[in-house]
Image (cartoon, rainbow, N blue to C red):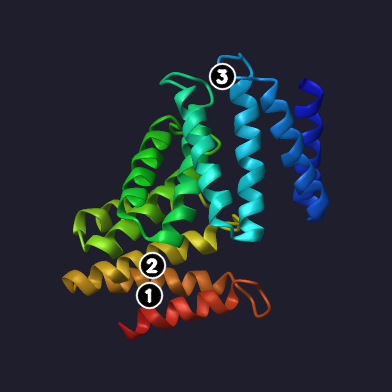
Amino acid sequence: STSLNNLGSALSDRYSKTGSADDRDDSIRLFREALVLHPPGHPTRLILLNNFANGLSKQYDLSGSLRVLEEVIRIYRECLGLCPPGHPIRDGLLSNFANGLSKQYDRLGSSSDLEEMTRMLKESLELRPHGHPFRMSSLNNLGNSLSRQYARSGSLGDLEGAIDKYRETLELCPLLHPHRVGSLNNLSEALGKRYDHSGSQDDIKEAVQLARESLGLCHLGHPDHAWASLALARSIRR
């Protein structure tokens, strides 16, 4: 059973590099076989479930099958049940589960998925204090989730929360950091939305300043150049 899991993991890793559908499908088949040998209560079932869910999530990204996505979420939910507070990988599972719920929200638009996703991202962030290597991604993901809640509810509290998280994310992205462009644009867009809400000149000035910096980091031909140009145009038009 350990060999099945190891081979499944190796094929999944190779799929991430090569995009081979055969590797993806074979890895999922091996994880299914290994799970049969690790029934509920088995001490290593959690690791297998997590690997299996990660593999299925990749399959969903290619196939778009709602049935596959529903299985992903079901498995992550079982994983989380095996990871009580204090478990060393709970933060990662919360993040993975939230990602699955995000995909389901994109498909179905259920407010309960968005609310559960936000709760999980908040808990995951709490488990990733200052200095944690994944704190930046948790901050950004929670900012995105709160921004989506604002788009749905119009609650200024959600928007304020998103701005706070985007601002802290940017602080962790110094000049030339690969994610600085995205962080600048996220914060600029959120400040622009708050300007739409409140009319604060400070917000719109900062939004334009951030968008200009983002575009300045994207030379012509940069993959984010068009995105940064549009972000600046939106800020100036407000």
Q: Which residue is mark 3?
A: 40
Sequence-wise, the earlier of marks 3 and 1 is 3
**Residue at (71% x, 33% y) in the render:** 31
- The answer, for residue 131, to whether it is visible in the render is no
Q: CA distance from mark 2 to mark 3?
A: 47 Å
Nearest to the observer: residue 29 or residue 113? 29
Q: Are marks 2 and 1 in contact (CB under 8 Å)?
A: yes
Quarter of the image for the N terminus: give it. top right
Sequence-wise, the earlier of marks 2 and 3 is 3
169 in relation to 200, above or below: above
Sequence-wise, the earlier of marks 2 and 1 is 2
220 in relation to 134, above or below: below
Residue 208's label in the rendered image is 1
The x, y position of residue 63, in whole percent, is: 65, 60
Quarter of the image for the C terminus: give it. bottom left
Three-letter code for the amino acid on which mark 2 is drawn: Ser
**Residue at (52% x, 29% y) in the render:** 79
